[in-house]
């Protein structure tokens, strides 16, 4: 059984530095033992000298011609052209890529006009995907800076170049997350237009649409090769009275949440009316201004969003505004027309425009599945299926819901699961929500059915922190220990909060436990 251990809680940065209501603003380089945190328009770098000690501030990443008032919306770490890189997407539409190396040079700096939010990188195809408030995704192959330039970009002297750049259009509202498949053949996107979509990066066509009754916030490809066999039948295990009581209390909470008369669409629309006041409340901090975080004060919301659609809010003219709870169908998707008849299964609609194929002949990539998170649920989808009843493999409802019964209506309105981090070697998923709660979910194989083939499930193991916190989540980063150390199959989880607090946990399988996927 997977175990967790709280290592420490520390004040990482000044509470006045960050901006609220962003996406994941932290990243970790396991190769170089570095923690990256986006604060305003800059990225702070911290050195991880030991997993049980707080990271130490090292430096800030710089770039040419910064825009006053600009802010980073999300941070991504990955490899491009064999270089480990950290990529930041900005409220101004700018995208900056640094090389994770001595001096952290800027590899390229791409200007933009529309606020950008989602970002993904893929090493083998040397590609970057960026989603923007124009409701589109831009895929860039082999981005680089023109020879002889300084790395700075401007409208009059653009230094950014790419071997190929194309746009994917079809979403009806903002796209907070994009994610490449393992081979780079497919790109998945999650949008607050209530849909998750899969695109072909070679044909540039929309392949699959999954619609849900809630806004979709994060998406990631997963592969059953890494799933672990489910535990034995219940009768073979010892009864766990405490776990049964916990489950009963959880079921009661879910029933109470379901009894709310308001529909999901009503709750989503109310978010913008109440979240500003909620998130603008002063965040508590145990420390004053930190000496190693001399963050300059910047005016907030100084970026011109005139080119954004609906200024970053849902496009009410094109997005589906009805909810499955109301009994009405969603509107048909824009973009390529569905080749098959839409199959409706309350509260789900799925439109396969073209059946996906296995990524290659490898057993590891033979059957890609898709993880999707919404305001309150985490779903496991099978995009290779052609009917809605088969597409939803499993669903963890109220994935970050606690049994201590905080204000239930606040939980419904404010929360959103914006972080999905898959750890293949441990067969787990880290799901992080704005409420500050992290759910650790295990992916399991149940066996093979003669009628429907392989069977899978998700099982929520536990929540972190163990007790509720009154803080907004700022970012989640996973440090994977090297394979040549005794700590392999142990991860260190860095959870950063808006008030500057950093909570760090160690997740591991006890010695002798066979719950680790090797191979």
Image: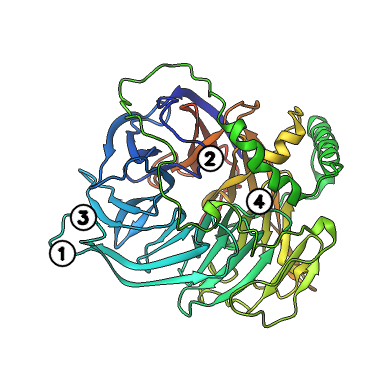
For mark 1, what is the residue?
147
Q: CA distance from mark 1 to mark 2?
A: 38 Å
Disc 3 on helix, strand or loop?
loop
Circle number at residue 434 = none
Viewer-side label of 2, 4:
2
Disc 4 on helix, strand or loop?
loop
Tell me the crowding category of disc 1: few under 14, some 14 to 19, or many 20 or more residues within 10 angstroms, Cα based: few
Q: CA distance from mark 1 to mark 4?
A: 43 Å
For mark 4, what is the residue?
374
Quadrant in the picture for residue 224: bottom right
Along the viewing direction, whichever of 338 and 310 lies nearer the viewer: 310
**Residue 163 appears left or right of 6:** left
Circle number at residue 151 = 3
Can residue 369 be seen from the camera position used here?
Answer: yes
> Can you give x and y, in whole percent of width and height, for residue 73 in the image?
45, 46
Residue at image x 74%, y 29%?
A: 407
Q: CA distance from mark 3 to mark 1?
A: 9 Å
């Amino acid at each position: 059984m997977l175990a967790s251990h709280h290592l420490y809680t520390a004040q990482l940065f000044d509470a006045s530095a960050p901006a609220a209501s962003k996406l994941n603003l932290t990243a970790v380089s396991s190769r170089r033992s570095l923690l990256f945190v986006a604060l305003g328009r800059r990225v702070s770098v911290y050195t991880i000298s030991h997993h049980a000690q707080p990271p130490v501030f090292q430096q800030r990443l710089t770039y040419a011609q910064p825009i006053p008032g600009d802010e980073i919306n999300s941070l991504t770490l990955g490899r491009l052209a064999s270089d480990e890189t950290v990529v930041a997407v900005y409220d101004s539409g700018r995208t900056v890529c640094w090389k994770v190396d001595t001096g952290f040079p800027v590899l390229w700096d791409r200007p933009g006009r529309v606020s950008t939010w989602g970002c993904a990188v893929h090493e083998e195809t040397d590609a970057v995907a960026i989603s923007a408030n124009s409701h589109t995704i831009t895929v860039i192959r082999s981005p680089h800076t023109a020879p002889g330039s300084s790395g700075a970009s401007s409208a009059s002297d653009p230094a950014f170049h790419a071997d190929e750049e194309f746009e994917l259009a079809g979403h009806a509202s903002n796209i907070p997350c994009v994610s490449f498949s393992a081979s780079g053949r497919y790109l998945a996107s999650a949008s607050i237009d209530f849909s998750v979509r899969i695109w072909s990066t070679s044909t540039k066509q929309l392949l699959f649409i999954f619609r849900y009754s809630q806004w979709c916030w994060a998406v990631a490809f997963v592969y059953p090769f890494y799933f672990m066999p489910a535990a034995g039948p219940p009768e073979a295990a010892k009864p766990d009275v405490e776990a049964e009581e916990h489950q009963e209390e959880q079921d009661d909470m879910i029933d109470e949440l379901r009894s709310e008369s308001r529909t999901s669409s009503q709750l989503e629309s109310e978010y913008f009316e109440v979240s500003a006041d909620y998130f603008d409340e002063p965040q508590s901090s145990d420390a004053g201004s930190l000496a190693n975080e001399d963050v300059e004060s910047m005016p907030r919301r100084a970026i011109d969003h005139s080119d954004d659609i609906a200024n970053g809010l849902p496009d009410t003219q094109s997005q589906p505004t009805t909810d499955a709870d109301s009994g009405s169908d969603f509107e048909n998707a824009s973009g390529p027309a569905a080749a098959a008849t839409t199959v409706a299964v309350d509260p789900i609609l799925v439109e396969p425009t073209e059946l996906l194929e296995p990524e290659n002949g490898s057993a590891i990539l033979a059957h890609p599945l898709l993880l999707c998170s919404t305001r309150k649920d985490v779903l496991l989808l099978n995009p290779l299926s052609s009917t809605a009843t088969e597409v939803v493999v499993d669903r963890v409802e109220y994935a970050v819901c606690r049994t201590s019964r905080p204000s239930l209506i606040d939980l419904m309105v404010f929360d959103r699961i914006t972080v999905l981090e898959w750890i293949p070697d441990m067969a787990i998923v880290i799901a992080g929500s704005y409420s500050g709660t992290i759910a650790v979910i295990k992916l399991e194989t149940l066996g093979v059915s003669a009628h429907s083939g392989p069977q899978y499930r998700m099982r929520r193991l536990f929540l972190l922190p163990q007790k509720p916190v009154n803080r907004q989540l700022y970012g989640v980063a996973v440090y994977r220990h090297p394979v040549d150390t005794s700590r392999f199959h142990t991860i260190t989880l860095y959870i950063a909060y808006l008030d500057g607090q950093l909570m760090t946990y160690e997740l591991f399988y006890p010695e002798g436990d066979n719950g680790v996927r090797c191979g």
